[in-house]
Amino acid sequence: MKIITACVANHVEALGVGLYLQGAFPQFFYVPSVPHSSQVHFAFVAEFEPGEIGEAFPVLIETRQTGHETTAWQELILSRRETEFDFDGFPLYGHYVEHPEAHFSDEGAYEVVITMEGKQLAIARYGIRLADRPNDDEIVGEG
């Protein structure tokens, strides 16, 4: 199993056999003030080789400010086909969405990291900046 892409976005959903992304891969998000807590919308795509289909893969997902404290949780990624439609030898692409609570202590670089058995599989980086509009509670990505 390998992660072929991972990103943060303004909005993510796994719909049917694909991902719906809005505002993906922003350079930064605006927050009204720091410290600030908010959900980070994170999506990734895993590729499973035919021999891996039907297996479960325990991964660790972490949100953190680069070089600072970490919020982490364990996730079990299941690799199963939803239909019988198949091509011999063709990999399975699994679409996954997470909405972790992130804690922004100040402006700067942040990241979401996926590891398995101590090996980094993916990283999605983004920045946090203070908004010019302090009454706006929504985080908004730009880039």
Image (spheres, rainbow, N blue to C red):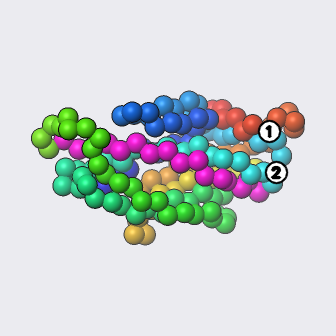
Tell me if mark 2 has few (under 14), some (14-19) or many (20+) residues whose alpha carbon lies within 10 angstroms of its own: some
**Dot label at residue 34:** 2
As drawn, the residue found furthest toward the bottom would be 118
Residue 137's label in the rendered image is: 1
Is 81 placed left or right of 11 in the picture? left
Magenta segment includes 95: yes
Q: Quadrant of residue 115?
A: bottom left
Q: Residue at x 78, y 51 (%)?
A: 36
Residue 140 on image: x %, y %: 70, 35
Please tell me whether residue 62 belongs to the stretch shown in magenta: no
Q: Which mark is residue 36?
A: none
Q: Position of residue 52 (x, y in %)?
A: 23, 55
**Magenta part of the chain:** 90-105
Quadrant that contains the C terminus:
top right
Task: Establish if 82 lies above or below 75.
Answer: above
Say whether disc 2 or disc 1 marks the residue closer to the N-terminus.
2
Q: Residue at x 20, y 35 (%)?
A: 85
Residue at screen point 77% across, 57% down: 105
